[in-house]
Image (tube, rainbow, N blue to C red):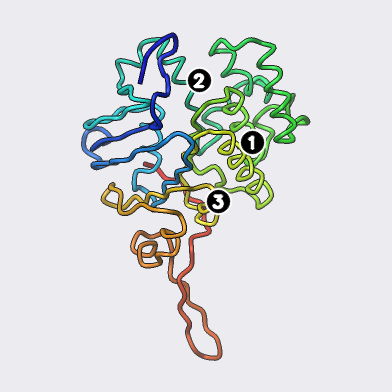
Amino acid sequence: MVIWGNYFDYMDNVMFELKDVYFSYLGKFPALCGINIRINQGQKISIIGANGTGKSTFLQILDGLIFADKGVLSFCGQQLNEKIFNAVKFSQEFRRKVGFIFQNPDVQLFCPTVKEDIVFGPLQLGFAKDQIQRRLEKLVTTLNIKELLDRSVQQLSIGEKRKIAIASTLIIDPQVLILDEPTAGLDPLTTRQIIDLLIEENNSGKTIITATHDLHIVEEISDIVYVFGVDKKIVKFGQADNILNDTALLTANNLVHIHSHKHKDKVHIHPHVHLDHHVDEH
C-alpha cells in the first residue's frame, strides 16, 4: 500500500486482513478468539453462526467502531487502531471507503426527515452539494423511496427504515459495504430488492461483507462463507454451496434445527434451515 494524497491506494487486492484477532467485552467476556481472515477487493463474504458467536463484534471491528485486544487488523495494508482514527484526515478517508449498515436501522437514523438522514453522511464528509443531489436522485429511483423523503423516520415500517439506512450508506459510494442482518424481519419483496441491490453493487466492484442468520440468501450474496462457532472462532470456511450442503456442520453450529411431525401415526424427523431472524447481541 502507498499513502499519498489519500490514505489508501490499492497496490494489491487485499482490503481487510485480520491476524490472530481477539476481543472481549469488559476484559472478561470473550467475543472473538483468534480470528484470521483475508478479504479481497470485490469479494462477497458472508459470516454465519448462532447467536453470541461474535458476528456483530467482527463487523464492528472491521468498521473501526471497536478495537481488538490482541492481534492485527489492516485495511489496504494500513494497520487500524484507535490512535490512527484520531487523525481527522484518516478517519474521513476511511469513512468514505467503508460503509456500515447496522442491524437496527434506528441506530443510524436520527434526523427529522428521511431526506436529511440520507444526505447527512456525505455533508459531514465534505461532498459537494451537487454531487450529493445527483446521488440522492439515483438512490430515490433505485430504492423507490420518493414518497418517503419528507416523512419522519419514526413513521416508517422496518423495511422502509432499512431501505433508508442502506441509502444513507450508499450515497457515500463506499468501496466496502458491511451489513449486519440486512434482511432481518423483512417481507419477501423487500428482501429480494435488497439482495438485488447488493449484487448490483458487487458487480460494480464493491466488496460486500454480510453477517446473517438467513441461510436462504447466503448463496446469492457470497463467494466465501465463514462459520463462527460458540468458541468464538472460525469453525470452517469455503464456497457457499459447500458450506450450505454440509448439514452436519450446520446442525452442530445451531444453524439448522430438528423438526418433527406426525404422519399416519408415525413421527418423522427432518433438519430445517433456520427461517427466523434473531438479534445477535455480540
Where is residue 90 shown, x and y percent of the image? 40, 14
Tag 3 and tag 1, C-beta contact below 8 Å = no
Q: Disc 3 marks which residue? A: 220
Q: Secondary structure at mark 3?
A: loop
Question: Which residue appears at 34% of the width and 38% of the height?
Answer: 38
The residue depicted at 70 percent of the width and 35 percent of the height is 143
Q: Which residue is identified by label 1?
A: 163
Q: Are marks 1 and 2 in contact (CB under 8 Å)?
A: no
| Residue 60: x %, y % from top left | 39, 32
* Image disc number at residue 96: 2
Of callouts 1 and 2, the N-terminal one: 2
Name which of mark 3 and mark 1 comes first in the sequence.
1
- In this picture, residue 175 sits left or right of residue 238: right
* In the rendered image, the vertical position of residue 244 relative to residue 261, given as above or below: above
Examine the rendering and report whether any part of residue 273 can be seen: yes
The answer to whether the residue labelled 3 contacts the one labelled 2, judged by CB atoms less than 8 Å apart, is no
Q: Earlier in the sequence, mark 3 or mark 2?
A: 2
Which residue is painted at 51% across and 79% down in the image? 261
Residue depicted at 42% across the width and 50% down the height: 225
Name which residue type carries label 1.
Answer: Lys
Indicate which label's residue lies in the foreground, 1 or 2. 2
Q: Vertically, is 282 above or below 49?
A: above
> Which of 67 and 126 lies nearest the eye of the viewer?
126
Q: Residues within 10 Å of mark 1 (few under 14, many from 20)?
A: many
Image quadrant in which the C terminus is located: top left
**How far apart are the two marked residues, 1 and 2, measured between alpha carbons?**
20 Å
The residue type indicated by label 3 comes to Glu
Residue 22, visible in the rendered structure: no
Q: Secondary structure at mark 1?
A: helix
How crowded pointer 2 is (Cα within 10 Å; few <14, some 14-19, many 20+) is rated as some
Seen in the picture, residue 46 relative to 247 is either above or below; the reply is above
